[in-house]
Amino acid sequence: MALSMEEQRILAEIEQELARAEPALAARLSAFGRPSRAVLLASSQKRLRSPWVLIVASLIALVMLTVVPVVVYALVSLRTMPKPHPAGHSAAPAQHHAAAVQPVMSAPR
């Protein structure tokens, strides 16, 4: 229920007189008009759930979930690559060695 202009004026005079006469009591009573911690926490949680925050967070998560595996895959594949032969050595001995290996078991005839 809204107060009339006269009632608002009277209430303001009472507040001013209380603040002049009893400043400590006025400070305590003024705390009732301020939002509590629970109200501030709820409003900050509501702000965190805004559509734009959710969209940005989703895009960041999507980028992280695609970029990190690609980087890990690249690092692992580079680690397992064969090392290049030093200059002056040919690949012939490696091919000769591969051809010399014979199977241990052969299929029955």
Image (spheres, grey):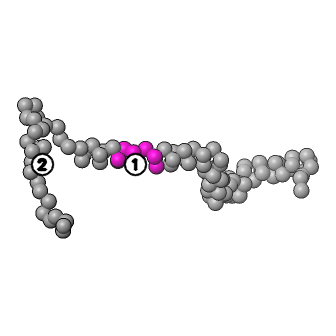
Q: Which residue is mark 1?
A: 69
Residue extent of the magenta highlight: 65-73
The answer to which of marks 1 and 2 sits earlier in the sequence is: 1
Q: Which residue is mark 2?
A: 99
Q: Amino acid at mark 1?
A: Pro
Q: Is residue 88 magenta?
A: no
Residue 75 in the image: state x and y as whole percent.
30, 45
Q: Residue at x 27, y 43 (%)?
A: 78
Would residue 48 be found to the left or right of residue 20 on screen? left
Residue 103 in the image: state x and y as whole percent.
14, 59
Q: Amino acid at mark 2?
A: Ala
Residue 64 in the image: state x and y as whole percent.
46, 46
Instruction: Name the quarter where the C terminus is drawn.
Output: bottom left
Q: Nearer the viewer, residue 5 or 75?
A: 75
- The image shows residue 109, relative to residue 98, as above or below, that is below
Q: Nearer the viewer, residue 35 or 3?
A: 35
Q: Residue at x 43, y 44 (%)?
A: 67
Q: Nearer the viewer, residue 67 or 79?
A: 79
The rendered magenta stretch, by its main secondary structure, is classed as helix
